[in-house]
Image (cartoon, helix red, strand yellow):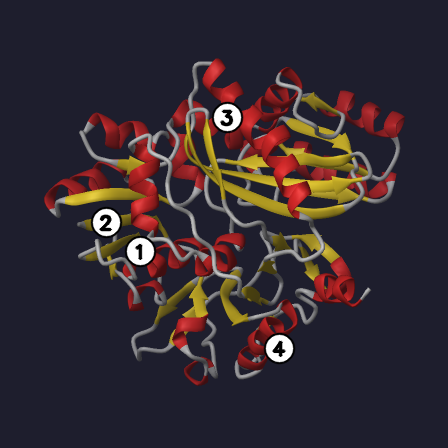
Amino acid sequence: MNVLVVGRGGREHAICKKLSESPQVQKVFCAPGNAGIAQDAEIVEIDEMNFTALSEFALSENIGLTIIGPENPLSAGIVDHFQEKGLKVYGPNKAAAELEGSKSFAKMMMGKYNIPTARYASFDHYEEAKAYIEEQGAPIVLKADGLAAGKGVTVAMTIEEALTALEEMMVAKKFGEASSKLVIEQYLEGEEFSLMAFVNGEHVYPMEAAQDHKRAFDNDEGPNTGGMGAYSPIPHISADVIEQSVQEILLPIAKGMAAEGRPFTGIIFAGLMLTKEGPKTIEFNARFGDPETQVVLPRLESDLIQVFLDVLAGKDPELKWKDDAVLGVVLASDGYPESYEKGHPIKGLEKVDSAAVLHAGTFKDEAGTICANGGRVLLVTGIAPSIQEARQEAYKKMNNIQTDHFFYRKDIGSRAIAESVK
């Protein structure tokens, strides 16, 4: 069959690459894609928010299945639109996608269905939020209620930092309408990890866990980003903790969504914290995580298109995973996650095996040179029997790329390696 992937980032590149391996797939299309995705799929120059043009393309090209990558089209109802046109699509409808589209809705669901999470309060008035922060003290976490491309979170270690972030979000409207309402919550201490699952109604099929590195700079310093690197598996998170997370977090949220008349079909991503009291939920996303997908999907032995089709048909999918570890390091534009320049050429990329590179924000200039077109530009992977070897492989490849106008963290996976030595 022909398949269409909607999106333009590293997550979509990983999905396209995995789908292109399937004997069941005749052709992979990606809209709007990027320069790197063009190596694994045919690029369709249609914006991910142009639902009419996308559905018309799917009908004209006899697309058997469309997979929606990013959160914005999901929250805006792209799945509902495709279903109305009689097209098969993988992802949650608009009502279910509110699990990611509104932090306060997600928190309400966690409270109602006894899903472990941090204490919180929601605010749409600056003065009330300010008073709450001053009363609670620091450290404290501020989250824009709406979608902010993974950047609408501030983990404030001091009151001053919290109040500055509050002013930026609610007064200066740093994230536009997304931060007109805020969720302010208790700071959780522990080991952060990500767990994604294929979901259809009350049926949940977990993937392998991954650990993301959110802060911009080494030693977890600097502002929160969309993710500077990731790896899977996580040697220091036990299978029992993963199973507890499935039973106490993923299954209850799927059942809760169904009970609310918003049954979820698609990918539920749980951002989790392993605290002294056990795993707690930081956030839910309604789609594959980025950069976690780039290190989890290469470990999938099963045919991804068959997994999607089985889940949609209400069948239990076969999920087989490789024992190998995958570690990915993000190359980002100088200045990310704040302001950064686009258009700089990425030098040295020709020295890196293209199979190991997943493009997030790239384009080709008139001379055919691959240039930066985003904050997170690409991710370089290493695949090996252990995290340590995968890390060595990833950095060996990344060292070929010149860092004029770019930067990357040098310590991705260091926690896992330190824990394995203990």
| Mark 3: secondary structure | helix
**Disc number at residue 67?**
none
**Disc number at residue 392?**
4
Name the one closer to the observer, 335 or 193. Answer: 193
* Residue named by callout 2: 3
* Residue named by callout 1: 19
Q: Is residue 94 left or right of residue 325?
A: left
Nearer to us of marks 2 and 1 is: 1
> Please, what is the three-letter code of the amino acid marked with disc 2?
Val
Q: Is residue 413 left or right of residue 87?
A: right
Please indicate, yes or no, whether residue 12 appears anywhere in the rendered image: yes
Name the one closer to the observer, 101 or 381. Answer: 381
> Please, what is the three-letter code of the amino acid marked with disc 4?
Gln
In the rendered image of this protein, does residue 291 appear above or below residue 188? below
Residue 197, given in percent of the width and then of the height, sits at 49, 40
Residue 220, given in percent of the width and then of the height, sits at 75, 58
> Please, what is the three-letter code of the amino acid marked with disc 3?
Ala
